[in-house]
């Protein structure tokens, strides 16, 4: 038996190559900006101006949010103080009116409610911090995801 060799082919080999470039952040790398500016003169400058405008806009919004959060926090503290002092003041008034047992009970109840709220809030904040730390660790190291 003789050995047969493949016949010559007139077919051509074609291939396609694609390059994927990714970057992280609001602005593309300098090389990409330079290439885009070469295609469309002035586009890099416009892109930088747009980025600066967007950054300013975001900072204004963040400042408003922070300011409003501070105002809400102060108003919340004022309201909480009034809500806390009203039943205590009522208990003192009741006790001063000759109903000392009922007055003391009202004061103790109000203080117990304040203590319970404090403990609950402290526990909630601790759980929130723990969850936030876990999420940040997962973002840093995806292998830690459960």
Image (cartoon, rainbow, N blue to C red):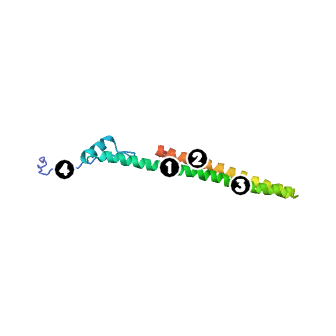
For the residues labelled 3 and 4, the Cα–Cα distance comes to 80 Å
Q: Which of marks 4 and 1 is nearer the N terminus?
A: 4
Residue behind mark 3? 82
In this orientation, which residue lies closer to the viewer: 82 or 18? 82
State whether residue 146 appears in this view: no
The location of residue 58, given as percent across then percent down, is 45, 49
Q: Earlier in the sequence, mark 1 or mark 3?
A: 1
Residue occupying image coordinates x 32% and y 41%? 30
Q: Is residue 139 left or right of residue 105?
A: left
Residue behind mark 4? 14
For the residues labelled 3 and 2, the Cα–Cα distance comes to 29 Å
The location of residue 144, given as percent across then percent down, is 50, 45
Badge 2 marks a residue whose secondary structure is: helix
For the residues labelled 4 and 1, the Cα–Cα distance comes to 54 Å
Q: Which residue lies furthest to the right in this view?
A: 98
The location of residue 112, given as percent across then percent down, is 75, 53
Residue occupying image coordinates x 79% and y 57%? 90
Q: Is residue 15 left or right of residue 89?
A: left
Image-quadrant location for residue 88:
bottom right
Q: Earlier in the sequence, mark 3 or mark 4?
A: 4
Residue behind mark 2? 129
The location of residue 9, given as percent across then percent down, is 12, 50
For the residues labelled 1 and 2, the Cα–Cα distance comes to 22 Å
Q: Earlier in the sequence, mark 3 or mark 2?
A: 3
Q: Which of marks 4 and 2 is nearer the N terminus?
A: 4
Q: Residue furthest top?
A: 30
Q: Mark number for residue 62?
A: 1
């Amino acid at each position: 038996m003789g050995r047969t060799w493949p016949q010559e082919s007139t077919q051509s080999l074609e291939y396609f190559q694609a390059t994927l470039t990714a970057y992280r952040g609001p602005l593309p790398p300098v090389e990409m900006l330079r290439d885009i500016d070469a295609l469309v003169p002035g586009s890099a400058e416009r892109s930088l101006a747009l980025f600066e405008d967007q950054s300013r806009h975001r900072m204004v919004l963040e400042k408003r949010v922070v300011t409003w959060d501070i105002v809400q926090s102060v108003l919340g503290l004022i309201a909480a103080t009034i809500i806390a002092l009203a039943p205590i003041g009522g208990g003192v008034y009741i006790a001063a009116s000759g109903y000392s047992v009922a007055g003391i009970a009202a004061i103790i109840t109000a203080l117990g409610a304040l203590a319970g709220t404090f403990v609950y809030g402290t526990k909630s904040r601790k759980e929130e911090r723990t969850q936030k730390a876990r999420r940040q660790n997962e973002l840093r190291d995806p292998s830690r995801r459960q």
